[in-house]
Image (cartoon, rainbow, N blue to C red):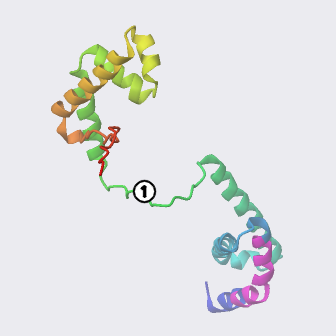
Amino acid sequence: MNADLEREFREFIEARSHTLFRTALALTGHRQQAEDLLQTVLVRGVRHWARIRTGAPEAYLRTALYREHTSWWRRIRRRPAEVSAERLPEPATADDTARVDLRLALRQALAQLPAKRRAVLVLRYLEDRPDSEIAKILGCSESTVRSQAARALTRLRELSPELNLQPKEEPNLQPKEVVKR
């Protein structure tokens, strides 16, 4: 872009940017999003300034604002909504091979378990079913389900220590000793 066109574009923006910003703000409802929207449209507009300056540049840029905003909300509808969280999730590693290795190790360890124990783990942890329902499905008692799950987890820990399957700490349900004075 030559110096004259650049100066002309700068003058136009100084004169009309507040009006374009109000339009962007009305479209988005948020100041930061309006700034981003206007900036995106102006970056595209400066590339085509030689062509659009001869017509109605404000109308062109306003139409570009509408169209860009429509593209934004279409993109947003296609992906899941962002959710605020108290803590940031762990940063993703640059290499996902560690996750693949863990999955393979888990599959190999599960394959070495007897069918009933494997079924108990799948029903309990993958399908999130209660012990009573697992017992009905497998045709055994609830205590058998619990013992099979405990034995299966113990065996998984032995077969694949890299899975780091540490038992959860159970709350102490024993009554406290009462000391009489």
Q: Quadrant of residue 144?
A: top left
Which element is circle 1 on? loop
What residue is rendered at 32% in x and 45% in y?
178
Q: Which residues are magenta?
A: 10-25
Q: Please name the amino acid that badge 1 sits on.
A: Pro
What residue is rendered at 20% in x and 21% in y?
112
Q: How many marks?
A: 1
Residue 124: x and y in percent read 40, 26
Q: Which residue is mark 1?
A: 89
Residue 91: x and y in percent read 37, 58
Q: Nearer the viewer, residue 10 or 121?
A: 121
Residue 154: x and y in percent read 21, 29
Q: Nearer the viewer, residue 104 or 55?
A: 104
Up/down of 164 relative to 17, above or below: above
Determine crowd level at label 1: few under 14, some 14-19, many 20+ residues with C-alpha closer than 10 A.
Answer: few
Say if the magenta span includes residue 14.
Answer: yes
What residue is rendered at 70% in x and 86% in y?
9
Q: Quadrant of residue 33?
A: bottom right
